[in-house]
Structures are given as C-alpha cells and as structure tokens.
Image (cartoon, coloured by chain):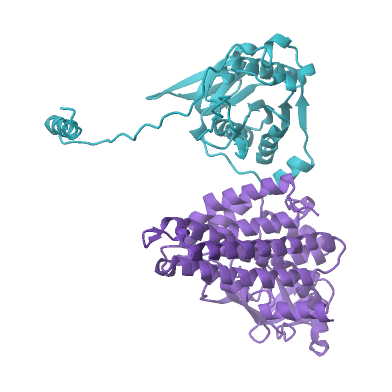
Amino acid sequence: MNIVVCVKQVPNTNEVKLDPKTGTLIREGVPSIMNPDDKAGLEAALELKDNTGAHITVVSMGPPQADAVLREAMAMGADDAYLVTDRAFCGADTLATSTTIAAALKKIGKTMKIDLIITGRQAIDGDTAQVGPQIAEHLGIPNVSYAQDIKVDGDTVTVKRQFEDRYHVVKAKMPCLVTALGDMNKPRYMTPGGIFDAYRENEVKQITRKDLDVEDTQIGLKGSPTRVAQSFPKQLKGKGTIVTPDGADAAADYIVARLEEKFII
Amino acid sequence: MDFTLSKEQEMARTLFRDMAENEIKPLAADIDEQERFPKEALELFKKYKMMGIPYPKEYGGAGCDTLTYEMALEEICKVCAATGTMLSAHISLGTWPIVKFGTEDQKKKYLPKLCTGEYLGAFALTEPGAGTDASGQQTKAVLDGDHYVLNGSKIFITNAGYADVYVVFAMTDKSKGNHGISAFIVESKFPGFSVGKKEKKMGIHGSATCELIFENCIVPKENLLGQEGKGFGIAMATLDNGRIGIAAQAVGLAEGALDETIKYVNERKQFGRPLAKFQNTQFQIADMVTKTKAAQLMLYRAALAEETKGAKNKRYSEEAAMAKLFCASTAMDVTTRCLQLFGGYGYTREYPIERMMRDAKITEIYEGTSEVQRMVISKYAMG
C-alpha cells in the first residue's frame, strides 16, 4: 500500500504575531515545526506501516527551508519525500495551494499508485481546514475529514470521524483522502540515526512549476481568488465557570446571586 | 572556525531535549527517591535506537557522531543525571572497548546486541584496593585450556546487576605490573559470576552501583579483549572516552540547575519583588551562565578531538581530562550556588535543586577524580 502524507511547516506558536501594517504573519525568530495535525496524520500512516506494511511518501509545499519537516518525517520513518517549491507558487490561497499540491500528487501518481492520502485537518498558522478536502475534489476522490482513527481493510478505509458531540464511522473505497485530528494519537519521536540518514543519505526530491500540468492562472497569487481583508489577534475570552448546584432552586439562586453581584438586577 | 552545529546535529539536539523534557524529567524525582533503576528510560532508549548512538550502522549503531552522543547525554542529564549515568556507562564504558579493541568475531557477536539494547553493557576496573591507582589489580585470570578462570572482586560498578556484558580487567601476569593486566568480555551468565552488595550513595540514586564477585568464573579464551597484557592501555583509552561523557553529564547538570533557578528567581518574591530583580541574583546568574557556556565549549572541543584524533587512532587524553576537570567543577559550583539562590526551599526535596547538587558531586570523583585529571593535564603541560 502506498500512502502519501501531506505536511506543512508552520511557526511554533499559538500566539501568532501579526504585522499590524501588512496583516501577515511575522515569522522571524519563531521556530518552525511540523504542523501538529499533519504530524498526527504521519503517525497514523506510520502505524499502518508498522502493522500491515506500507510505503510512505511525504509531500510538502513551501519555501526551500521547509525541507526540514520532510527530513523530520523521514527521521520518524517515512520512506520518501517531495518538496513542492517554486517562486511561482508564492502568495497562494487555499485554492491555489490545493491545485498545486493535487497537480504534484498527479505527477507522483505517475510513478506509483497512490492508495491513501492523509493530510492534517488544518494548519495552526491559517486554521482554514480547506486544503485537504480541496485536494480530494481536484483529484476526484472521496474525502473523509476529522479522523480520530484510521483502519485499512483490503481496498477500503474505515474512519472514526469526530463531531462535537458524537462520532461517525465512515467507510471509503481507496484511493481516498483522510484529514487527521491532532489528538488522534501521540506521534513517535524521530530516531537519532534516522535524523543522520535523513540528512546524509536520503534525498528530498523537488517538484517545481515546470513539473506541473497547471495553468499560470491557477497557481500562486494569480490563482488565488481569496484576499485577506484584515488579520487580527483574537480577543481572549474569560474562562467560564462550571457549577453543579443541588437542584433547580439552588441553580436559580446561584444565578440570581451572581447577577446581583454584578448589579445587573 | 565555526561554532554552529550541522542541521542533523541541531535536529538531534531538539529530539533529545523534547524526549528529556517529556519522558525523563517526570520520572527523575521518583527514581531518586525510590533509588530505583531508570527502566522506563532504558526502554525508551531501546525503542528509539539510542543504545549505540555513535557506533557504525553495520553493527546496529545509529551511525551518528561523537558530538551528537555527548549532546544526548547533556540533554538527558539536564533533567536526570542518574539516567545519563546508565546510558554513558553502557555506551562509553561497556560498548566502546569492544568497538575499538574487539576482534571482528567479538564485534559481530556483541555489538548488535549492545547497540540495540538487548544487552546492557558495563565496565569493571575498580577494586577495593585499586581505585585511582588502577594498576593495583588483585583480580586474577589464569588460562586453563580453552578458557580463563577469573577470581577476585570489583566494586562501584555502574549498571551492575542489570548489565548483561561487562568489560572486566584482571591480572594475567602479576610480575609485569601494568603490563600484566588483561581485558575480558564477561557475560553475566558465565559460571562463577555474581553481583554483590549494592552501594547506598549520596547522589545518582537511580544508577545501580554494586560489587562484582568472580569465583572461579569461566571466561572462554576467545573473550580476551585485545592481547594479553594490554588491558591497562585499553582501560586508560576507554576512560579518556568515558570522561567526555562525564563532562557532558556535568554540563547538563549545570544547565539543568540554571533552568530551574532562572524559573524560580522570577517567581519567588522577597522584600516585595522577585529575586530576579536583585543585582546579586543577576550577577550570580550571569557568572554561572558564562562558566557553564565555557564548560560546554570544553566539552564540545573534547568531543571533536575524539572524533578527529580517535579516527586516526590517536589519544585525546589531554582534551578529555581538561573537559572533565572543568565541567565537573562547574557542575559542583553552579549547583551549589543555585541551591543558595533557592534558599530554604532549595534544601527541601520539593525542588530538584538539592538532587542536582548531590548528583553533581560524583562528576568530580568517578572515571578519574579531579586530582587524576590534574595529573594527566600536568603531564601534558609540563612533560
């Protein structure tokens, strides 16, 4: 079985700092990491490899330095890595990004049959959760998002799909795409030898503009219909208080008392 | 000259740091309190192929370099020095002599098991009457047909009781003094081998330190390591390499103590402001950070000396001795001063700083006391 895992290099921070003038992320001085949802997706693929055997290819789109997350993935146990990189891809929104990655996957698909594509649900720097499902649309394959568990049986995958208050168990025929939730597993560490091999023996193959069968109008800034009007840090909401009063009367008393405290009533 | 790490060394350091912080640190206090062997860390190191970090892949090692291995010890010892002792005794003392002096058959037989952690390694040189003066070996080995018969005892042996393979030194010809000492690969299952009393120590509580007893212990002739009479040289070369590991442990202890102290002085308030706002605290921290950084440079220099000189089969005793002397004294000084900044709380077991101070002391003693390092260094400096 051939699995492709899409990973993104993101700044390691949940307190994203924005340039107040341009509204873009300030990346300087912030260490880069593999996006947590993607890392969980990679771990899910590695577990499938451990249990049933699989060839794992990792793919990332980004600047040349994004090769670090691909080396990290190989140091964790991935077999092969591709970096989709070109100045022509700069400024891509989710549509142009998914178009580019889908075209890259089609190219990779010419050298091997891809059975399963795993992406993270969303990246911590953009939080759109759009790129994974869009890749599936471009490729015309089924997509199952929000995976809490992925099982493979023959040519089908069974995914435990998480909702806010319940799970759905969904079966899909391969080839298909699954988006993984960050808390679906605890990703393994790299091995020291794996790190040295990833840098000294293994290769990150590059896919550039000329390798892709796409129009210039579909990629980069030109292929991006989305414009970010404004970016701003989210106002932090205060933590709520959970109380368990003894019965309805006690609950009503509690609420009245709090409202009186704040001079609302 | 360039002080930057390669990308793979940088990534490996991040790995060791994450692993130490998430997996080893939460167990450190319990290991110390219960005086128990760090078995969880051993399993972790096995799982992530860390039992042979600097050794060739053909023997099951990870194929990394010496500096990367020393950084692993440094990061681990930041949070738990006893766990670092277990790993360094295995890699630097128990496995290294076989990598360096073993025959191809010995390497093929023992290294894959040592490098994967199926076997834990140890090193047995010290005896009740032969500590700093290692030449006073009383343990005897007598050749009897196809095997040697060992009789005697060793003390203060790290990993004893848990190790499967010990590199043991014994006299094959007492009349020749140092030139009568030979090295042997002894398996714990060989007849006549047993583990004696476990020591109760001031620090590194998690490290198993015991006596070894050889009573007509049968060691096959093919387990002679190197030639007969070359054991003292093997022991000294192994200690050069091991001392760099102790320097790494010492640097880790100093860094770990500083991490804890910087956190504490920012939180702890006296006279209405955090301790960090007092100039005494700031200057103490400045001095300690500087000294620790200097120690780290000494350590890395020694690690690089081992990598380059070792590859040419040259000794690096001077670099190793200087690194161990300076790093150990730094660890002792920094942990003591950090504890002083903690005040009364530092003296309690509520904080890890008292453990770090107790653990630091051993770095001035084992694998050659600071005085032995001065003997080595002065010999090089003065001829």
Where in the figure is residue B1, as x and y percent of width and height?
Answer: 81, 55
Work out whether B21 lies above or below B97.
Answer: above
Corner quadrant of residue B112: bottom right
Left or right, residue B308 beside residue B34: right
Which image quadrant: the N terminus of chain A?
Answer: top right
Where in the figure is residue B259, as x and y percent of width and height?
Answer: 53, 57
Q: Is residue B109 visible?
A: yes
Where in the figure is residue B24, as x and y percent of width and height?
Answer: 53, 55
Q: Is residue B38 visible?
A: no
Left or right, residue A139 beside residue A229: right
- Report the chain shown in purple: B
Colour applied to chain A = cyan
- Viewer-proximal residue among A226 and B105: A226
Which image quadrant: the C terminus of chain A?
Answer: top left
- Viewer-proximal residue among B209 and B223: B209
- Which residue lies most toward the left here? A249
- Which residue lies most toward the right here? B312
Q: Residue at x 52, y 49 (%)?
A: B22
- Viewer-proximal residue among B60 and B150: B60
Corner quadrant of residue B95: bottom right
Q: Residue at x 52, y 69 (%)?
A: B337
Where in the figure is residue B347, as x and y percent of width and height?
Answer: 43, 70
